[in-house]
Amino acid sequence: MKLLNYAYHTPSIYYTFLPTLPVAGVDGTLRNRMRHTPAAGNVRAKTGTVVGVSSLAGYLTASNGHRLSFSIICNGGLSNAPMRNLQNNICVALCQ
């Protein structure tokens, strides 16, 4: 979170870094996630996965117009799908 917030408050970093992040429902590792929700086209984030752990970290714009940085790390899952669904649901809720 410190790195995401630092990047956000340092325009030379933020505007270089932001385009490298996949967009929910559009491209990269997020192209099939959060489609047809308020998070689609809004959430820009990086995924991370190792056995039993799934993470999603990046930026989104809340419905009140505030730009949020977030990091969601799910531990101890037997499969990645439920952890990804939880991350998706949290992002959608933050975008509404």
Image (tube, rainbow, N blue to C red):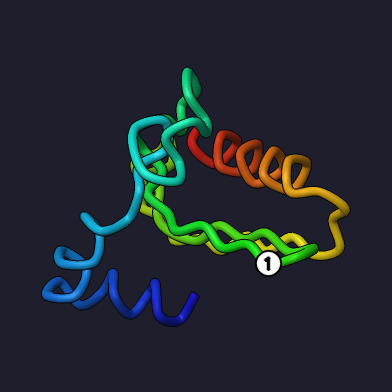
Q: In the rendered image, which quarter is residue 12 located in?
A: bottom left
Residue at 80% of width from left, 65% of height from top?
75
| Rendered location of residue 11, percent (x, y) | 15, 71
**Nearer the observer, 24 or 27:** 27
Q: Is residue 16 left or right of residue 22?
A: left
Residue at the outermost left position: 12
Q: Secondary structure at mark 1?
A: strand
| Rendered location of residue 81, percent (x, y) | 73, 41
Crowdedness near tag 1: few (<14), some (14–19) or many (≥20) residues, C-alpha within 10 Å: few
Q: Is residue 65 left or right of residue 74?
A: left
Residue at 15% of width from left, 67% of height from top?
16
**Nearer the observer, 3 or 84:** 84
**Nearer the observer, 18 or 38:** 18
Residue at the outermost top position: 36
Q: In the rendered image, which quarter is residue 52 located in?
A: bottom right
Q: Which residue is mark 1?
A: 50
Up-down relation of residue 2 to residue 69 (above or below): below
Amino acid type shown at disc 1: Val
Up-down relation of residue 7 to residue 38 (above or below): below
Residue at 45% of width from left, 46% of height from top?
29
Residue at 86% of width from left, 63% of height from top?
76
| Rendered location of residue 86, percent (x, y) | 72, 43
Residue at the outermost front position: 51
- Count of numbered circles in the view: 1
Up-down relation of residue 54 to residue 22 (above or below): below
| Rendered location of residue 25, percent (x, y) | 41, 30
Q: In the rendered image, which quarter is residue 27 located in?
A: top left
